[in-house]
């Protein structure tokens, strides 16, 4: 074999190899098991004969000036290995994963494992540069004929590279027209249990099964489609049910011409295919729609995507899900032997989220799913396999089933807790009962200490003053006061008057407080001397008791407990009405989860205007413990909080992640039960806190479901953070956009039902009806709250994935900001991402290393922030949450216009680009791909950079920084390190 240029498909595979990190992704193994008296010498000669017939098997691939070519390599080795059957799997794996030296060749190796006198396995491993799926059929058929020497075997016609080039050139206009209106970069796929897979090739595992029933033939005939079209339609229907609105798969499409049927080589082109299913569409209609779409794609299958759409970024994984299907020959006969052919042997790697291999033969259908276990747990991959089988069987019998009704969701829907507290009472009654049992025990510690008796007496004095001011049972009373024991007595006094409280934190802006006071219709304002608010009847928080007070209100379990105002999408806050029954259910449930009792001391560190304050204030007081109230100054100072906890023997602390960071930074360590909530708990913070406390509980819940709805105890050395399972009398439903349960492990929106639901939004029945919906999965009359949070069921609990309204669209790409933040948190203490003027901006605290490069290694280019802003600390709201509105505006002024750089390296790189691309006046910041660059362009540029600048630039760098300025900077960095 003289020097021969690579074919079009080979060039794409070669480039993917040169990207680096491909590992064994292009290794194509298959195996034949022989039982009986095998003639090893005859088999050796037969294998040599196959290699003689198909010279591609002994090829080597080299390059010159960035142009790859193939030459004849050394003979293909035939190795005989005696091995115990128990060690076969490991030996097979080692042989499959062993790298090929492309330049030295050959690109095939053959190993015969001798397992016993009458048991052998032949393993053939070929590189995809010289071998495709149908080549397996050719190899096995030729091997069988040569082993028996019953039929002479003639060499196939050599491959006509010129004819292939003509076909690609002739098809290029139609292919460019086809792809001009279609996307060529695709979003991440939604699959059960899938984390974002690394772009790099990962170690893989497989799920395999074999069906003897003629399932494809029956269904395809009934629907009037080919079996391949049925397989694609079934996989796309499954992806659609997983929540992928526009499913995409990368398909291996055969490009063999009539004379190539008996030739070993590469005659396949991988192209993406997207479908547009609808929930009400029947599977039959969907399959016929897929058929029509595929037949359009077939017409352009000769042309690689990089040629047809020059701006496309080539890569090892064209789409997150790929699919191969082929029909194989019947297993050939080897004289005197029983044989079993494993047509596709697993190569132990994963190049994307999921790869479906389907091989159909006369004896049945073999299915293999390759997946990366680091990104998708095996039980989830097994679930996908089972779902695909369910879909195939179901549509065989019922093709008129709507896609939305395909059987892929397990029952029951969601996570449920039936634990309840039928003997519960309202909080003021429970506190009064504690005062009767232990009147002299300390209840509250603030500026002064209050016993239970003193607390109730002060509360009753407040209740008396409110009644005299005209407050009636059922009214709403605003309270504004500094954090102290008097604030606790004030809230209890409002309840003892039969009213509900409305917190107004003095630290909040006056304009907001005035709005809340006016919007709520509060009948009175209970305030201390430091409050400047005015409005309804004002009642002093402090004052003497009257001797003629009426009996305090009781039996309030069915009444309103408080109204908390939260941020609204319109810019105006909205009031959430919470009942006493919901509050009591929460307190008793957390009592059980935290084992809180008379010996417990809770720290109250949260603003009264933040609903979680209701837990830390009232749980200790309904269980006979005590509460230590931190002042506003102490709550903002980690060292002061640490001292307060130590001084008072605090056993339970609830705080937001921001406050826990303050404590951790202050060196906090104590045997407390720690609750973290109000914002997502980052894994690095959890790992930092866990060894410092006795127990670490991650709690989650919106204000509309009464403080917390779930709890998760963080284990030592956590690998990921869950928000856990439901609290008492709570149901957690994960639903799709049409309120259908999603399959286990698939992301959906969280809906919460049960005893914790608020009554609704004060004075806003329309909004209440929009967010509090009838629950179709509970008892008649049950409601569920739409949280707007994306979650999935994982390991028996819920994993929080971000807000549904945290998605933004930047330059046409839908982006989850929380996903970018999660990546940055691997390299910074804190991170937040926002959008300014169509640019992603990352804000970080305590960042380490090159964040842009680290982000580019994991995220697609459109998700890498354009600007990184380092902060000393994140701005926080009075509730201790991140204040996104206070993030500083970044400087988006460009560093300079294109073409103005004068650095010598930049000019050399620019000159190379202009030579290779055939363009003039390329600017510093113009994208290589937008200029028409593709895989071989990169290879030629990299070769010239090496020749002129003495630096090897890895191909992947062109994807991280695809500009003249970016490549020049990379070259400068590499030259500086020489």
Image (cartoon, rainbow, N blue to C red):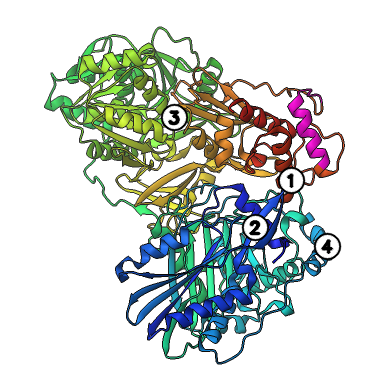
Label disc, if present, on residue 564 of the rendered structure? 3
Label disc, if present, on residue 940 of the rendered structure? 1
Q: Most extreme residue toward the top, as rendered?
A: 529
The secondary structure that most of the magenta stretch takes on is helix
Quick one: quadrant of the C terminus? top right
Whether residue 332 is situated above or below residue 195 in the rendered picture? below
Label located before the other in sequence (4 or 1): 4
Pointers 2 and 4 in contact (CB under 8 A)?
A: no
Q: Secondary structure at mark 3?
A: strand
Q: Secondary structure at mark 4?
A: helix
Residue 908 covered by magenta stretch: yes
Label located before the other in sequence (2 or 4): 2
**Nearest-to-viewer mark from 1 and 2:** 2
Label located before the other in sequence (1 or 3): 3
Q: Residues within 10 Å of mark 3 (few under 14, many from 20)?
A: many
| Residue that mark 2 sits on | 61
Give me the C-alpha separation between circle 1 and circle 2.
16 Å
Give me the C-alpha separation between circle 1 and circle 3.
64 Å
| Magenta segment | 900-915
Residue 354 covered by magenta stretch: no
Pointers 3 and 2 in contact (CB under 8 A)?
A: no
Q: Position of residue 781 (x, y in %)?
A: 41, 54
Q: Position of residue 94 (x, y in %)?
A: 42, 60
- Rendered residue at 43%/20% (across/down): 524
Give me the C-alpha separation between circle 3 and circle 4.
68 Å
| Residue that mark 4 sits on | 169
Q: Residues within 10 Å of mark 4 (few under 14, many from 20)?
A: some
């Amino acid at each position: 074999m003289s020097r021969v240029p690579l074919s079009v498909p080979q060039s794409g595979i070669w480039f993917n190899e040169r990207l680096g990190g491909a590992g064994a992704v292009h290794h194509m193994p298959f195996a034949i098991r022989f039982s009986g008296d095998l003639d090893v010498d005859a088999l050796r000669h037969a294998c040599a004969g196959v290699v003689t017939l198909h010279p591609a098997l002994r090829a080597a691939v080299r390059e010159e000036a960035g142009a790859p070519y193939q030459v004849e390599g050394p003979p293909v080795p035939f190795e005989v290995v005696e091995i115990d059957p128990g060690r076969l799997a490991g030996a097979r794996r080692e042989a499959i994963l062993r790298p090929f030296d492309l330049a030295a060749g050959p690109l095939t190796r053959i190993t015969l494992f001798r397992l016993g006198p009458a048991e052998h396995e032949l393993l053939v491993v070929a590189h995809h540069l010289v071998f495709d799926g149908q080549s397996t059929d050719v190899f096995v058929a030729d091997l069988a004929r040569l082993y028996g020497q019953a039929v002479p075997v003639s060499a196939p016609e050599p491959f006509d590279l010129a004819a292939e080039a003509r076909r690609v050139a002739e098809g290029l206009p139609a292919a460019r027209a086809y792809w001009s209106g279609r996307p060529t970069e695709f979003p991440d796929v939604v699959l059960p249990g899938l984390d974002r897979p690394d772009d790099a090739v990962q170690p893989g595992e497989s799920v395999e099964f074999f069906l003897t029933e003629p399932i494809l033939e029956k269904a395809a005939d009934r629907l009037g489609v080919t079996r391949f079209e049925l397989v694609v339609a079934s996989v796309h229907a499954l992806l659609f049910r997983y929540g992928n609105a526009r499913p995409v798969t990368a398909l291996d499409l055969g490009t063999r011409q009539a004379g190539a049927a008996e030739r070993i080589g590469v005659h396949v082109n991988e192209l993406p295919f997207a479908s547009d299913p609808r929930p009400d569409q029947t599977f039959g209609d969907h399959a016929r729609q897929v058929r029509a779409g595929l037949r359009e794609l077939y017409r352009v299958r000769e042309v690689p995507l990089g040629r047809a759409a020059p701006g496309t970024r080539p890569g090892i994984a064209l789409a997150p899900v790929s699919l191969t299907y082929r029909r194989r020959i019947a297993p050939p006969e080897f004289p005197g032997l029983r044989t079993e052919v494993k047509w596709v042997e697993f190569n132990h790697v994963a190049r994307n989220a999921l790869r479906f291999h389907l091989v159909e033969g006369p004896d049945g259908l073999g299915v293999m799913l390759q997946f990366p276990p680091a990104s998708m747990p095996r039980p989830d991959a097994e679930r996908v396999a089972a779902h695909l089988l369910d879909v195939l069987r179901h549509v065989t019998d019922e093709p008129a089933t709507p896609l939305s009704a395909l059987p892929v969701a397990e029952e029951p829907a969601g996570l449920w807790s039936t634990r309840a507290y039928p003997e519960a009472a309202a909080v003021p009654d429970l506190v009064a009962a504690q005062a009767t049992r232990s009147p002299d025990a300390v209840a509250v510690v603030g500026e002064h200490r209050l016993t239970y008796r003193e607390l109730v007496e002060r509360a009753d004095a407040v209740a008396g003053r409110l009644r005299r001011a005209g407050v009636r049972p059922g009214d709403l009373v605003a309270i504004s006061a500094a954090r102290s024991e008097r604030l606790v007595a004030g809230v209890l006094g409002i309840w003892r008057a039969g009213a509900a409280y409305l917190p107004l934190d003095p630290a909040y802006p006056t304009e907001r407080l005035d709005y809340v006071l006016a919007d709520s219709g509060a009948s009175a304002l209970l305030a201390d001397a430091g409050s400047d608010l005015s409005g309804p009847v004002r009642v002093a928080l402090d004052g003497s008791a009257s001797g003629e007070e009426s009996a305090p209100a009781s039996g309030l379990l069915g009444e309103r407990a408080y109204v908390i105002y939260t941020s609204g999408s319109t810019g105006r806050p909205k009031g959430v009405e919470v009942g006493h029954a919901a509050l009591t259910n929460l307190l008793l449930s957390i009592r059980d989860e935290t084992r809180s009792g008379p010996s417990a001391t809770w720290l109250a560190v949260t603003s009264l205007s933040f609903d979680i304050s209701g837990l830390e204030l009232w749980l200790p007081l309904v269980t006979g413990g005590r509460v230590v109230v931190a002042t506003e100054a102490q709550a903002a100072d980690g060292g002061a909080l640490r001292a307060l906890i130590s001084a008072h023997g605090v056993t339970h602390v609830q705080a937001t992640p921001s406050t826990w960071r303050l404590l951790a930074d202050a060196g906090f360590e104590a045997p407390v039960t720690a609750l973290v909530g109000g914002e997502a708990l980052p894994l690095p913070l959890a790992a930092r806190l866990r060894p410092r406390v006795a127990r670490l509980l991650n709690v989650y819940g919106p204000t509309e479901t009464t403080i917390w709805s779930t709890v998760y105890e963080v284990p030592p050395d956590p690998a990921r953070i869950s928000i856990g399972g439901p609290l008492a009398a709570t149901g957690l439903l994960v639903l799709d956009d049409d309120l259908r349960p999603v399959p286990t492990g698939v992301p959906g929106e969280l809906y919460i039902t049960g005893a914790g639901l608020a009554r609704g939004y004060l004075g806003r029945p329309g909004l209440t009806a929009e967010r509090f919906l009838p629950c179709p999965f509970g008892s008649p009359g049950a409601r569920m709250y739409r949280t707007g949070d994306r979650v999935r069921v994982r390991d028996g609990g819920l994993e929080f994935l971000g807000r549904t309204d945290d998605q933004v669209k930047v330059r046409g790409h839908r982006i989850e900001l929380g996903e970018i933040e999660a990546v940055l948190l691997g390299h910074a203490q804190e991170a937040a991402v926002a959008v300014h003027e169509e640019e992603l901006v990352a804000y970080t605290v305590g960042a380490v290393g090159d964040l842009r490069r680290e982000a580019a290694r994991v995220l697609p280019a459109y998700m890498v922030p354009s600007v990184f802003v380092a902060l000393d600390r994140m701005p926080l709201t009075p509730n201790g949450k991140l204040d996104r509105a206070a993030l500083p505006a970044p400087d988006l002024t460009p560093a300079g216009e294109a073409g103005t750089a004068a650095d010598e390296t930049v000019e050399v790189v620019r000159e190379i680009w202009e030579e290779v691309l055939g363009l003039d006046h390329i600017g510093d910041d113009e994208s290589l791909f937008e200029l028409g660059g593709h895989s071989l362009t990169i290879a030629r540029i990299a070769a010239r950079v090496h020749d002129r600048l003495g630096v090897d630039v890895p191909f992947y760098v062109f994807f991280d920084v695809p500009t003249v300025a970016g490549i020049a900077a990379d070259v400068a960095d590499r030259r500086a390190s020489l």
